[in-house]
Image (cartoon, helix red, strand yellow):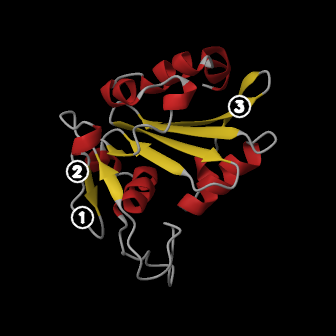
Amino acid sequence: MYFAALLARTEDGWEASDMELDDVESLSDLIDLARSAAVDDDTVVALIEQEDAWFGVVRVDGEEDPRYFVSNASAAARSSYGSMLTKELLGSDEEEDELDVLDLDGTEDGEEDAVAVYTDEDTDEDAVGGTGAEPVPAGPLGDPRLLDDLGVTHKQLMALDGDALSEIAESLGATEVLEAVR
């Protein structure tokens, strides 16, 4: 069972909307959905969780490249929506059977895009970068600093488990609006 919501930052705080995952068939669809929820091209945070197995955060700031974080990449890679995120983060070259070519990472063909893979022991200086088709790590994957400026530090994000989305919403000051769409 999945839960997904969009939190759009406004001048007056956060607005939440339920994200209908049935309409999301690709990462591009998810990004388009997030951008459509933006108020004046401000920040939108897409939150996705699959029970207590994993959670993902996608941050979209206007037309800038989206940023991603997945709490448990190996668990997420075994689910349909989580696999979209992990494939993007790992730069997987695998093609979907029904699609000829799908470029979700925003790089030109042949370019490699470094991805930070963090473990609990990693610090900023120890971050391991990776490219290409890597094995899926059994821990966090992506940019743990994507919410630092919004009040959720990378250490807090990496330590979350259980009801992570509620804890993120609390740190953002968006608990009431998130619970309204839950």
Alpha-carbon span between mark 1 and mark 3:
34 Å
Relative to 94, residue 73 above or below: above
Q: Which residue is mark 3?
A: 9
> Does residue 62 show up?
yes
Q: Residue at x 48, y 25 (%)?
A: 152
Amino acid on which disc 1 is placed: Glu
Q: Residue at x 42, y 22 (%)?
A: 163
- Where does the image place residue 101, in percent across and percent down from the top left? 50, 82
Nearer the observer, disc 2 or disc 3? 3
- Where does the image place residue 58, in percent across and percent down from the top left? 53, 44
Name the secondary structure under disc 3. strand
Mark 2–mark 3 CB contact (< 8 Å)? no
Mark 2–mark 1 CB contact (< 8 Å)? yes
Alpha-carbon span between mark 2 and mark 3:
31 Å
The N terminus, quarter of image: top left
* Image quadrant in which you'd find residue 14: top right
Amino acid on which disc 2 is placed: Pro
Query: Is residue 49 toward the left or the right of residue 45 in the image?
Result: left
Q: Which residue is mark 2?
A: 137
Q: Nearer the viewer, residue 162 or 44?
A: 44
Query: Is residue 119 toward the left or the right of residue 79 in the image?
Result: left
Amino acid on which disc 3 is placed: Arg
Q: Which residue is mark 1?
A: 134
